[in-house]
Amino acid sequence: MCIQRRREVSRLPSVFDFGRYSLSTGSYQAFFTKYIIGGRTVDIRLTETIIEPAFFGLIGLALMIIGQPVGFLILICAICYSLSYFATYWQGDNFIMDKIDEMILNEEYVNAFVDGMDPDDTRGVRYYGRAPVDPEVRRQMVDSIIVDTDFVEAK
């Protein structure tokens, strides 16, 4: 696999020419996606967080059982690999949730801040703190409060 990954990386376009994402983990081998485990189709997330580390963890465990010290190293590496991908997917999930929250905040902040509506009516958006008494002043302030976003249209 190391040799295959090296060949893959050596023929890819340069990241300095904007031809490739520099943090790319390489091409995904869809070997496991043909299977269903526990009624769930195997996807890349399940493969990277559970299946691949478990495969190498079992190899490490087998080597430990037959008395090979390198088995312990392989087992520890498999656990670290799994945890790193769990953390990566956790960060990705939180990034998307932050963007969704930002969109909801932009849509509901006027109702919460200017109109003083209840959080049940503004999808949970609530203003914390004291606001100017005059609703017109609050309305003028909204433009400086709402997060400025330029949404890219998905194609």
Image (tube, rainbow, N blue to C red):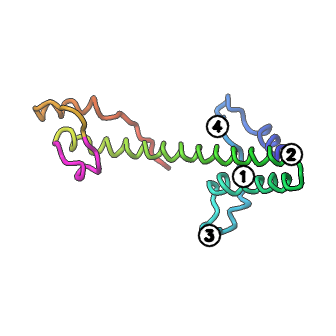
Examine the rendered structure and indicate whether residue 36 appears above or below residue 83.
below
Q: Give residue 21's mark.
A: 4
Task: Provide the residue designation for mark 3.
Answer: 38
Pointer 1: what residue?
A: 53
Q: Give the mark, 1 or 2, whose residue is nearer the N terminus.
A: 1
Is 5 one of the magenta-colored residues? no
Q: Which residues are magenta?
A: 116-126
Front in this rendered view, residue 55 or 48: 55
Q: Earlier in the sequence, mark 1 or mark 4?
A: 4
Which residue matches tag 2?
69
| Residue 114 percent coordinates (x, y) | 18, 38
Mark 3 to mark 1: distance in Å? Answer: 18 Å
Q: Amino acid at mark 1?
A: Pro
**Disc 2 element:** loop
Residue plotted at (64% across, 37% down): 21
Q: Nearer the viewer, mark 1 or mark 4?
A: 1
Q: CA distance from mark 1 to mark 4?
A: 25 Å
